[in-house]
């Protein structure tokens, strides 16, 4: 090839690279993250690492890799960097998985997703894939036998993508149980393997808890509900005027050949200091990865489970 042609080709490639870089660096979410999220202090990091499980009880069947995605098109949770750090350190400490952090939709291609065993949505809000191919890559990834994990606002998500919303299991419809309150939680199935973190006992915890739009909530015929609000406690039931009623918090489900674990915990950064909840998250992650065998039979088909209620408020 002529030297001038080579030079022109080089300049053209450089221009394309600069355009791509500019598009990425001008991404509004990346700008928001850079402005809003500060590096965690040593003290903040220590609170998380001290609460992490010492090891994974379930030995991975193979080396596992998770895509931790944190993009927000709606409300932005300040707990996102705490969740990201917790997941990075959780994987390293327990050797259950490695993780990559991402916030741009270009990661959702069939080719790129081949390297991952699960996608973790860390407080993502109002996600909307710019390209149909990205939406299809996401759906196909889970349905083909991989895992989907969602923390908190992962259910305030996918309003324009009903098939993705259905995979998660429900969409946000307000939070009468605000972040400033400490709420009672019951174990719907105390003997379930993903509830081992709570030693078979209900508990109290400070966090913001969602209720779900009845039109989108998958319900007990689809979901295996693990943890719910304990409506037997007036501090919980008095927050609504149409209750008491069931408000699920953590669940698992099958989606095609894939596995889904969702928990509403994670609004507050302090949630990632809670050893029991981090253990619950790890077990849920290992279920989604396919390393922990767990019964995902829908709750409506279970007849022998007796809920473990929370104790009286301390």
Image: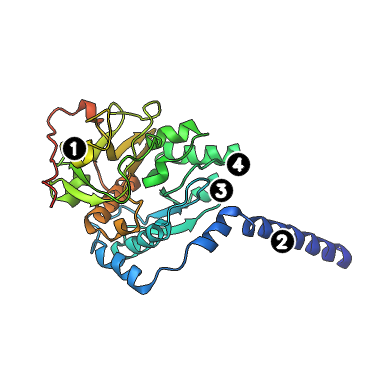
The circle drawn on residue 18 is: 2
Residues at marks 1 and 3, CA–CA distance in whole angstroms: 36 Å
Earlier-in-chain disc, 3 versus 2: 2
Q: Is residue 275 above or below residue 213?
A: below
Q: Judge left or right: residue 166 versus residue 16.
A: left
What is the CA distance from the residue labelled 3 to the residue labelled 4?
8 Å
Query: Which x, y percent locates residue 94?
Result: 29, 62
Residue under label 4, please give it.
130
Nearer to the camera, 17 or 64? 17
> Where is residue 133, by image quadrant?
top right
Q: For the residues carrying marks 1 and 3, which lies nearer the camera in this image?
A: 1
Q: Is the residue 194 above or below the residue 82 in the image?
A: above
Label 1, secondary structure: give it. loop
* Relative to 310, 91 lies left or right: right
Position of 182 compared to 35: left or right?
left
Please name the residue that numbered disc 1 is placed on. 188
Q: Earlier in the sequence, mark 4 or mark 2?
A: 2
Q: CA distance from mark 3 to mark 2?
A: 19 Å
Residue, disc 3: 105
């Amino acid at each position: 090839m002529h030297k001038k042609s080579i030079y022109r080709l080089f300049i053209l490639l450089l221009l394309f690279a600069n355009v791509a870089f500019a598009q990425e660096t001008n991404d509004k979410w990346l700008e928001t993250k850079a402005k809003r999220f500060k590096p965690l202090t040593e003290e903040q990091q220590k609170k998380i690492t001290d609460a992490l499980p010492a090891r994974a009880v379930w030995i991975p069947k193979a080396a596992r890799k998770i895509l931790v995605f944190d993009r927000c098109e709606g409300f932005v949770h300040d707990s996102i960097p705490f969740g990201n750090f917790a997941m990075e350190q959780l994987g390293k400490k327990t050797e259950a998985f490695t993780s990559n952090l991402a916030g741009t939709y270009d990661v959702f291609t069939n080719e790129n997703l081949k390297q991952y065993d699960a996608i973790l949505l860390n407080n993502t809000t109002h996600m909307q894939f710019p390209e149909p191919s990205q939406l299809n890559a996401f759906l196909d990834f889970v349905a083909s036998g991989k895992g989907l994990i969602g923390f908190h606002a992962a259910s305030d998500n996918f309003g324009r993508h009903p098939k993705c919303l259905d995979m998660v299991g429900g969409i946000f419809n307000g939070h009468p149980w605000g972040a400033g309150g400490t709420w009672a939680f019951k174990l719907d199935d105390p003997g379930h393997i993903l509830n081992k973190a709570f030693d078979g006992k209900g508990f109290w915890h400070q966090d913001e808890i969602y209720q779900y739009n009845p039109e989108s909530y998958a319900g007990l015929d689809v979901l295996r509900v693990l943890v719910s609000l304990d409506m037997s406690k007036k501090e919980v039931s008095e927050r609504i005027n149409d209750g008491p009623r069931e408000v699920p918090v953590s669940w698992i489900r099958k989606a095609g050949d894939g596995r889904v674990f969702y928990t509403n915990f994670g609004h507050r950064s302090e949630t990632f200091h809670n050893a029991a909840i981090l253990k619950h998250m790890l077990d849920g992650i290992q279920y989604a990865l396919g390393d922990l065998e767990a019964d995902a039979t829908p709750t409506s088909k279970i007849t022998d489970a007796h809920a473990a209620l929370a104790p009286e408020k301390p």
